[in-house]
Amino acid sequence: MDSTTLDVDGSVMEGGGQILRVSAALSCITGTAIKISKIRAGRSTPGLRPQHLCGLQLLRDMCAGSLDGAVIGSTAISLAPGKLTSGKHLADPQTAGSVGLLLQASLPCALFTDASTQLCLKGGTNADMAPQIDYTVKVLKPILEKFGVHFDCDIRMRGYYPKGGGEVVVTVNPIKQLSPITMTDRGTITKIYGRAFVAGVLPYKLAKDMSTAAVRTIRREIKDLYINIPSLQEKEKACGNGNGIIIIAESSTGCLFAGSALGKKGVYVDKVGIEAAEILLRNIRHHGCVDEFLQDQLIIFMALANGTSRIRTSAVTLHTQTAIHIAEQLTQAKFTISKSEDDQNNNLTFIIECHGAGLSNPNL
């Protein structure tokens, strides 16, 4: 690799796969060659797992680039990007690796192509330690539309741990330039809704019990809103057995928050419903405008946007700090984080402000 290659330390801050996803995506978009070392050094099993390898190969294909060192377990890779082009792309890690995380890496790249791009992403649609596909569709997608981002998400098959087998087809429209966003006024919570589901051979009663436990937990704190969490049994469009719940709160100003949980062997389903409800309540108590799972996912879009974006949030997560660190390395974006006291509720929130790099799509 030549002297223009940027070295990225994969062990900094949260030291996980996010460093890989953000740096590889920005490499493809900016045309900057990168070398990532100490990949996932902060994890119990360092190096590339099948999902990370699959994501890197997807980005390499999208930008007609070259990828060196990319094998399972590798702790260092080099990516030299070519030109981003539209088309149909497939990513299949052959595991229950998260479809949502594959999309995190590939969606920003698809925005900078010359025409509509179709991504066929396989694996786990509802996987642990990753955003459920329902979160992507119901929370992330509407907020990204504020940047001018438009994509369709067709959930053709749901897949669960350990087999995976899910399939989501995402169609992304390119954009000339991203618009900045301002999300600093939370307003009031106006709706709470979601879905509790079972798939495969699991009995429908489990979904009902999750929903009931979640509603009961929320009711202790929020008494005056109708809560709609239907119970669903997935049969035809589900691979394997799984159960879980996602609950979404919507505000009068269009802010979205979510709490979700997946069932595990030996865990009572009541606890699954309660866990999701408590996560949701935690994320709406602070009067920020994004939840703890959305803030880091917005950083790359704020960095690319043409103008100044501002979002109000609760404590800034390590994932978000890591995404900011990588975005500032690979773009001209500048971030600042400032405290903002909410006098009415005596809650401490933070404003994340970004003067975006204003990248234009050279292919449009």
Image (cartoon, helix red, strand yellow):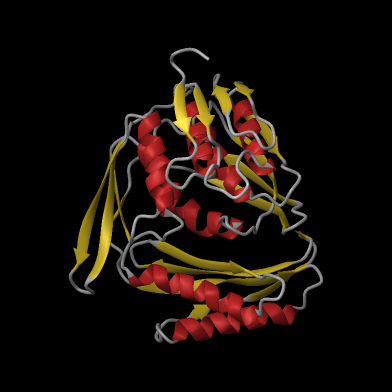
Image spot of residue 127 (x, y percent): 64, 58
Residue 38 to residue 233: above or below: above
Does residue 88 appear left or right of residue 254 in this picture? right
Does residue 76 appear left or right of residue 298 in this picture? right
The extreme top residue here reads 2
Which quadrant of the structure image shows residue 224? Answer: bottom left
Whether residue 174 can be seen here: no
What is the total number of numbered labels drawn onto the structure image? 0
Image spot of residue 210 (x, y percent): 62, 79
Image spot of residue 93 (x, y percent): 72, 42
- The residue lying at 49 percent from left, 21 percent from top is 33
Image spot of residue 63 (x, y percent): 58, 24
- The residue lying at 21 percent from left, 72 percent from top is 346
Does residue 202 appear left or right of residue 247 in this picture? right
Residue 34 to residue 186: above or below: above
- The residue lying at 50 percent from left, 37 percent from top is 10
Q: Nearer the viewer, residue 75 or 139?
A: 75
Does residue 205 appear left or right of residue 46 in this picture? right
Which quadrant of the structure image shows residue 125? Answer: bottom right
Q: Nearer the viewer, residue 327 or 142?
A: 327
Whether residue 214 can be seen here: yes
The extreme left residue here reads 343
- The residue lying at 37 percent from left, 67 percent from top is 251
